[in-house]
Amino acid sequence: MNTEIWKASSSRLVDAHCHLYEFPSEEVEKYQEYRILAVSDNFESSLKTLKLAERFDNVIPCIGLHPWEVRENCLEEVEQILKLAPKALCLGEIGLDKLFTPQTFKLQLKVFSEFLKFSKEYELPVNVHAAGAWREVYDLIRRYDIEKAVFHWYSGPLDLLEEIVGSGYFITINPTVTINKKHMRALQAVELENVLTESDGPYKYRGFYLKPELVKEVVKTIAKVKEVEVENVVAQVYRNLERFLF
Ligand SMILES: [Zn+2]
């Protein structure tokens, strides 16, 4: 991993899963109080994310191919994306989805395996999507002996969460935790040491317009659930981000 990509920044709030390239640049400029792990969905957006990281110190670039973007003959695109890796600090958004795109699952397995092989070889952490495939994603990550992983918007089973934490991996908590019961149960069960905060913005979901600002609400909810001060949550999540990356 090329750690020189990590730039000093005074931003302390963490958005560990954001499709930042989709926001207009005036808005990106306003988000400098957040340390943003900016994920990409395909080759083109990976390029955009890398450009944002050059421009803004608070942006940490991730490159990848989202499972929803997986289609026939996309392995060439994967290869193109991986050529950009020397400029990235993380691979994402990558993973498997059996809930929304089960029709490409076989191909997703192939693509995800390619990314994991690469992650292992170049020690790049992974930012994963695992809707409807929590167990499959975890098992593959273990099989490839990946050291650093974050399971974004975790709403999988609690016994698996125990294994995730036991392996030293992280989950992100999303603003929708206040209305999503499975996600809330995960927050109640997980140790603060394994938590990162996220927006997954820009995305509309059940009355929420997800964007980095909402991380402030997430931090407050975590503080309430864990019965600790908001400041402690902010500091611990920031330390977790550093542990995830380095
Ligand atoms: Zn996402």
Image: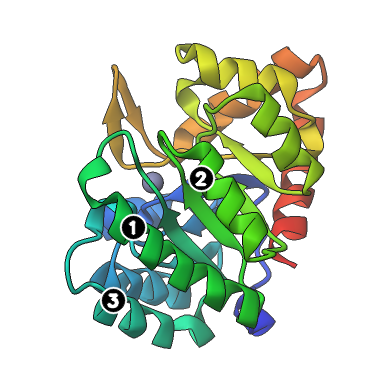
Q: Quadrant of residue 5?
A: bottom right
Label 2, label 1: how many angstroms apart (C-alpha)? 11 Å
- Cβ–Cβ under 8 Å for marks 1 and 3: no
Name the residue carrying label 2: 136
Q: Which residue is pictured at 36% across the width and 42% down the height?
A: 201
Amino acid type, label 3: Leu
State which mark lies toward you, 3 or 2: 2
| Residue type at the position of mark 1 | Gln
When the figure is inspected, residue 76 is found, relative to residue 125, above or below; the finding is below
Residue 152: x %, y % from top left: 52, 42
Mark 2, Cα crowd under 10 Å, few <14 / some 14-19 / many 20+, is: some
Q: Position of residue 148 (x, y in %)?
A: 69, 60
Rendered image coloring scheme: rainbow
Looking at the rendered structure, the kind of residue marked 2 is: Glu
Task: Tell me, yes or no, whether the two marked residues, 2 and 1, touch with CB atoms within 8 Å.
Answer: no
Q: Cα distance, mark 3 to mark 2?
A: 20 Å
SS type, badge 2: helix
Relative image position of residue 181 (x, y in whole percent): 51, 11
Mark 1 surroundings within 10 Å by alpha-carbon count, few (fewer than 14), some (14 through 19), many (20 or more) = many
Classify mark 3: residues with Cα within 10 Å, few (<14), some (14-19) or many (20+): some
Q: Is residue 202 left or right of residue 185?
A: left
Among the two numbered marks 3 and 2 on one chain, the one whose residue lies closer to the N terminus: 3
> Could you tell which of marks 2 and 1 lies nearer the N-terminus?
1
Distance Cα–Cα, label 1 vs label 3: 10 Å
Residue 95, horizontal then vertical, whole percent: 43, 53
Residue holding disc 3 = 75
- Residue 72 lies in what quarter of the image? bottom left
**Which dot marks residue 108?**
1
Q: Would residue 143 be found to the left or right of residue 16 on screen?
A: right
